[in-house]
Amino acid sequence: MRVAASQLPLPTTAAPPRRRRRAPAPPTAAPRPPPRALAAILRSRVIACLRAQDGETALQAAHAAVRGGITVLEVVMTTPGVLEVIEDLCRSYPSLTFGVGTVLNAADARKAIEAGAQFLMSPGTVLDILHDLEESNVLYIPGVLTPTEVLSACSAGAKVVKVYPVSVMGGEAYMSALKKPFPVVPMVASQGIKIGSIKGYMEAGASAVVLSDTIFDNQLMKDRKFSKISELANLATLEALQFTK
């Protein structure tokens, strides 16, 4: 016997499960902009590194370098009166960028920052300093030499590294080799760099170079020939500015 289609039981279908609305993701904080000192270094391409036997000579040499066009300058921690020198420079040239080099521990780092240092540099990576300045407006540039050290410093939060001592490892050739695996890591080449080789280092991948004795020549410092220091600073500045990436 046939049953009319209208008499057949209709299949029951379960209502599709309602999709739960995902809770809106909490707003994420905007990434902190890099310290202003980093932009100043990448713009100037030259960091003048000053060490002197006394604070007065250091101060006069620093003023001479600024007259020659230097806009980023570090005074090494071992210079007598280094903190007073930094304080004076920051007052005299508020638009320029000054830092302290050869900072080896967190205590010295704090002293330098209190004096007004906008960046700190070390010959190696001091993790205490790197961690202390992670959320700071003060830039820390740790020293590195090998690919492993670059990885370690960047993993710990470094925004830029200093390749030191670069000249004894092969100079521009070593700079180029070290840069290849890390194309986006800003690297500052340091040690033994002369006026005339700045462009070569930047072509090898350096974002900036540190110039020490090539500007602050030991004999010129002893003879207090500060006008000659201004001339050397000017030559270095002009060479760096001629290079266009």
Image (cartoon, rainbow, N blue to C red):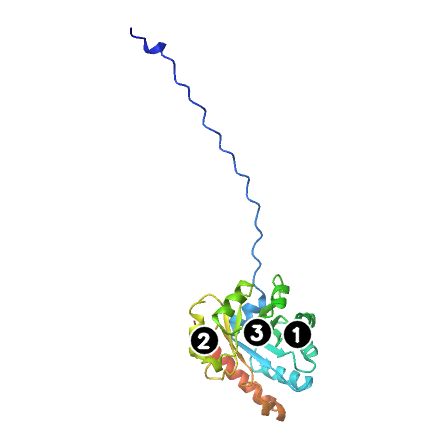
Read off the residue under disc 1.
90
Say left or right for 31 vs 132.
left
What secondary structure is marked by label 2? Answer: helix
Q: Position of residue 215 (x, y in %)?
A: 55, 85
> What kind of element bears circle 3?
loop
Residue at left offset 59%, top offset 69%: 140
The residue type indicated by label 1 comes to Cys
Amino acid type indicated by mark 2: Met
Quadrant where the N terminus sits is: top left
Q: Examine the image and state in which quarter residue 116 appears.
A: bottom right
Percent position of residue 130, x then y: 60, 66
Read off the residue under disc 2.
175
Q: Amino acid at mark 3?
A: Gly
Q: Which residue is mark 3?
A: 124
For this view, does 211 lie left or right of residue 9?
right
Marks 1 and 3, how far apart in space? 26 Å
Q: Is residue 202 left or right of residue 52?
A: left
- Considering the image in quadrants, where does the C terminus appear? bottom left
Q: Residues within 10 Å of mark 3 (few under 14, many from 20)?
A: many
The spot of residue 17 in percent (x, y) is: 47, 29
